Image: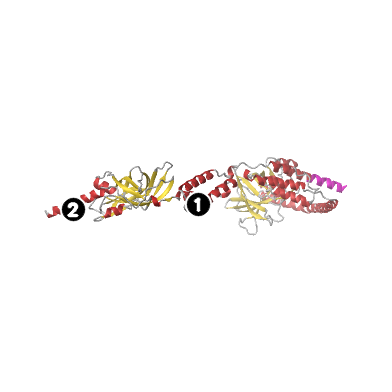
Amino acid sequence: MKHKTMKSMVRRMAALAMAAVCTFSLTQVNTVKAAEKLEAGDYVVPITSLKSKAPIAAVNEAFNKAFGESAKVTVDGEGNMTATVENNHMVINMMGEYHANVLTVEGAEYLSYKTEQSSTTFGNPAAIANIEVPEKMQFPITPSDDGVCELKITVDFMNNLMGGGNPYPTVVTLTLDFANAQVDTSALSDLLKSYEDLVKEDYTEESWSAFEAKVKEAEGLLANGGVSAAEVNEMIASLKDLKGKLQLVSDLPEADYSKVDAAIASVPKDLTKYTDGTVKALQNALQTVVRGLKQNEQNKVDQMATDIEAAVKGLKEKTTSDNNNTNNNTNNNSGNNNNNTNNNTNNNTNDNTSNNTSQNAASTTLDKDNLKDGIYEVPVWLWHATKDQASMAAQSLNSTARIVVKNGVKTMYIYTKSMTYGNIEASLQELKVADANGNYTSATVEEKNASGNPTCFSFVLPHTQEYLNVKVNPHVAIMGHQDIEARLRIDYSALKLVSEDANDTTVKVTTPASGSSYGASSAPKTGDYDNYAAIPVVMLIAAAAGVMTMVYRKRQAK
């Protein structure tokens, strides 16, 4: 009987405890001032209490911290309020540790979830299960003048004990200390942080300047403190507006180059009658022309035109003394060049003939498609893109190239030198090679001279056909830095073996062999000017210079 009586008393005590836990009423908090009318915005509001009527201290202690120390309160334009809280796990110390969690708040939106422990049986603290509960939730509130808000909630512990596993709603009071509310600036801080990866150079100067000024203003607002909700809201709206107005440079149309083109067209066809200094100044102005600038840099483009116009106006004709010096130099150089040409022709004819004969004889046994590892030499020319004649840039190419075969891979090395058109001297700066599908890949620059100009390019041969489609670019400003289509003509019939060792250190493949040549490249033909129809000014200068030289030489001969 005693055992039954004790058991009955325990049950009654348990019933009383459960009744106390599930019986809640409003609690007046006199220390909280009346909630004032807040302007629209976000606030961090301290939580004074989260209470029930339960007289059990352990229950109130655990429950009071369920929503943390503060809530984020958002006020809309009509004065409606919502509270966002973090849902904290509760441990109730009552004849053992019981795990409890708020599961629902009436009208709430659940922003995230987490896994927590939950006690399933009162009187048996060891009965624990893992369940998914809200982590962050947002719900409407209607506070009284004292900041008291009524909430209808469910708690897993109560659902199990009083609801038989079903929801057991209860009413609690959440008291907020609006008197110590602070404006929440986290949204503004997060917005500024999201802009940190933006790159100034990607946007127009005008749009970026306005945006950047507003960012600095926002940073100052946060640093100074004491900011109002209206100021935060206005700043967020302004930042988003200016961010949306940022203008990408890549989206701008190209600048107007009509003045530049007109200035270039005004360059005299014959520059030989002007002093070297003024011609040099003109060439410098022409070399500053950069194509492809966007509309936001129109002032730079206009300045290019202005500089060229000024250089053209600044051209000064040579005096009589200047002409005499030029004539003397020309005569001397012409005589020397003629002598050298004759000597070279006489001395080298037999050697070249015998060398070519032996080379060709040796190469007849070589199969271009089945070459063994080693180093080879082969004649090459830079040919017109569509016509069977030398390219205008043919003089830039050494007529002997090398092919290094290693593990079956054929890598060609070609050698370049400076070329002259009229008064313009240039070197090939880029070489692009087409594969079997017509896709172009940039060749590798292997060597440069003291002036920084490439002298050797290398690339993997895509095939062993006679003609290889290429693009060359001398980076001459007056040509607009354009790629020029051409063909590399390769005479595989004259292919010869230089070394059977692909790694032979005695053969520096990046440097052309001294005295190893199959003859000078074919001189460019007049008809080849068609390939440069887009750059008439350069062609006119070159043609005029050639005519003037011929006339002068005929006069001297007479």
Asked whether residue 526 is drawn in magenta, I would say no
Check the image and name the residue furthest to the right. Answer: 558
Q: How many labels does the image show?
A: 2
Q: Tell me what residue is drawn at x 68 percent, y 56 percent.
A: 449
Closer mark to the observer between disc 1 and disc 2: 1
Q: Residue 261 carries which label?
A: none
Q: Is residue 111 left or right of residue 456?
A: left
Q: Tell me what residue is drawn at x 51 percent, y 46 percent.
A: 239
Amino acid type, residue under disc 2 in the picture: Val
Badge 2 is on which residue?
10
Asked whether residue 555 is drawn in magenta, I would say yes
x and y percent of residue 303 in the render? 69, 47
x and y percent of residue 63 in the render? 30, 52
Disc nearer the start of the sequence (1/2) = 2
Query: Which range of residues does the magenta coloring cover?
Result: 545-558
Amino acid type, residue under disc 1 in the picture: Leu
Badge 1 is on which residue?
221
Mark 1, residues whose alpha carbon is within 10 Å: few (<14), some, or many (≥20)? some
Q: In this view, does 442 lie to the left or right of 520?
A: left
